[in-house]
């Protein structure tokens, strides 16, 4: 005989939404006011009240203007001897970030390699994928020609392999802030290049600098810097506004992460797949049987399917962040009874960064 027992359990299937980290950046810079503090900012913030005058405040304002609606960020005010990498790690206790923006200009390769080490350290320590944007100094108009400036800036990235780092020379006022804001603009997706003209022209002061000879910045200098993996603005003759070129990362020639949109896509997927994998630890319903494998493939490709969703309005198609994952986009292999390997691939959509048009006359006579 048995006593009647009923157990009702609410089973968490881990199907809920994930807090968005994308478009939330951490800015760091020198200052006297609120030194040593991590400050949360958004479009309603009074920057004059929180920050002393300087590059940090200027770049935060530039980021807000170029990001537009619903922009938010964090700002850490460094004191002069303070380690910026340690400040980034300390900030992880409070918030998560898609990117770190160091507004203190540098020409030191050690800073670049430290930024790449930080990218990997944050992954190893916190499971957080956070790329780093570094500011390079503006031209010294008292002592440098544009040729001198090109040589100095190109030398910073020479021989460096850092696929989690972006270098932004100060060829416009608050250039790195303008780019950071453009990357956070919610009118576009994280898969869009900052080169996209329809995003709009850069907002704010775009006064072109001059060198010691009084020569104004030209597109020739910008092309030289861009070809050497620096992220720079761009413009078109007889077309109003100043825009941006590619968001270059310091990946090696032939690497997958030479542009920031590829970095952002794979980092976003990594954040979401990590959460799915954590929930699967020790769950025997995930096993090598065909049914379980099929369910696991659907579960692990869910972030990619969500990212691939597009919207059609009339004849206009607003694309998703990636192409819809095909059947071969995921492979699951059980190496042992307790160890499983999952490989996935995401395919970015085509993007026209170079357009050539051929024009022909039709001089045929009507028949």
Image: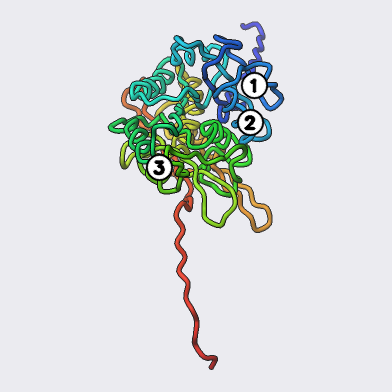
- Residue 108 relative to residue 76: left or right: left
Residue at (52% x, 53% y) in the render: 236
Q: Tell which circle, 2 or 1, labels the residue nearer the N-terminal end.
A: 1
Residue at (31% x, 42% y) in the render: 254
| Residue matched to label 2 | 64
Callout 1 secondary element: strand
Q: Residue furthest right?
A: 44
- Establish if 348 lies above or below 45: below
Which label number is shown at residue 41? 1
Asked if marks 1 and 3 touch (Cβ < 8 Å), the reply is no
- Establish if 40 lies above or below 241: above
Specify whether residue 291 is in view: no
**Foreground residue among 184 and 148:** 148
Callout 3 secondary element: helix
Callout 2 secondary element: helix
How crowded pointer 1 is (Cα within 10 Å; few <14, some 14-19, many 20+) is rated as some
Label 2 and label 3: CA atoms lie apart by: 25 Å
Quarter of the image that includes the N terminus: top right
**Residue 20: horizontal and vertical position, in percent?**
59, 27
| Residue matched to label 3 | 226
**Residue 77: horizontal and vertical position, in percent?**
55, 14
- Establish if 185 lies above or below 354: above
Which label number is shown at residue 100? none
**Residue 194: horizontal and vertical position, in percent?**
52, 42
**Foreground residue among 15 and 225:** 225
């Amino acid at each position: 005989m048995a006593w009647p027992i009923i157990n009702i359990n609410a089973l968490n299937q881990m199907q809920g939404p994930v807090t968005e980290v994308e478009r939330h950046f951490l800015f760091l810079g020198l200052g006297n006011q609120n030194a040593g503090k991590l400050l949360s900012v958004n479009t309603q913030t009074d920057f004059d009240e929180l920050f002393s005058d300087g590059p940090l405040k200027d770049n935060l304002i530039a980021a807000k203007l170029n990001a537009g609606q619903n922009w938010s960020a964090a700002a850490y005010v460094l004191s002069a001897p303070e380690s910026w990498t340690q400040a980034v790690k300390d900030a992880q206790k409070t918030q998560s970030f898609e990117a770190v923006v160091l507004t203190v200009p540098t020409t030191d390769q050690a800073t670049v390699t430290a930024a790449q080490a930080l990218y990997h350290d944050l992954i190893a320590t916190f499971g957080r994928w956070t790329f780093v944007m570094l500011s390079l100094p503006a031209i010294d108009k008292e002592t440098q020609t544009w040729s001198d400036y090109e040589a100095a800036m190109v030398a910073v990235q020479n021989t460096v392999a850092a696929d989690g780092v972006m270098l932004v020379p100060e060829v416009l006022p608050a250039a790195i802030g303008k780019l950071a804001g453009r990357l956070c603009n919610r009118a576009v997706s994280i898969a869009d290049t900052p080169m996209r003209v329809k995003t709009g022209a850069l907002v704010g002061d775009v006064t072109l600098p001059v060198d010691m000879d009084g020569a104004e910045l030209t597109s020739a200098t910008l092309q030289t810097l861009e070809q050497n993996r620096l992220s720079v603005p761009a413009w078109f003759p007889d077309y109003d506004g100043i825009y941006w070129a590619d968001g270059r990362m310091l990946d090696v020639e032939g690497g997958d992460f030479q542009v920031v949109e590829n970095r952002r896509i794979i980092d976003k997927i990594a954040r979401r797949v990590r959460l799915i994998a954590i929930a699967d630890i020790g769950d025997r319903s995930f096993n090598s049987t065909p049914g379980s494998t099929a369910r696991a493939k659907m579960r692990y490709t869910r972030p990619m399917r969500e990212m691939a969703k597009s919207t059609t309005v009339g004849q206009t198609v607003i694309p998703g962040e990636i192409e819809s994952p095909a059947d071969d986009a995921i492979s699951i292999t059980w190496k042992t009874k307790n160890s499983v390997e999952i490989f996935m691939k995401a395919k970015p959509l085509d993007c026209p960064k170079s357009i050539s048009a051929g024009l022909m006359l039709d001089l045929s006579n009507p028949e």
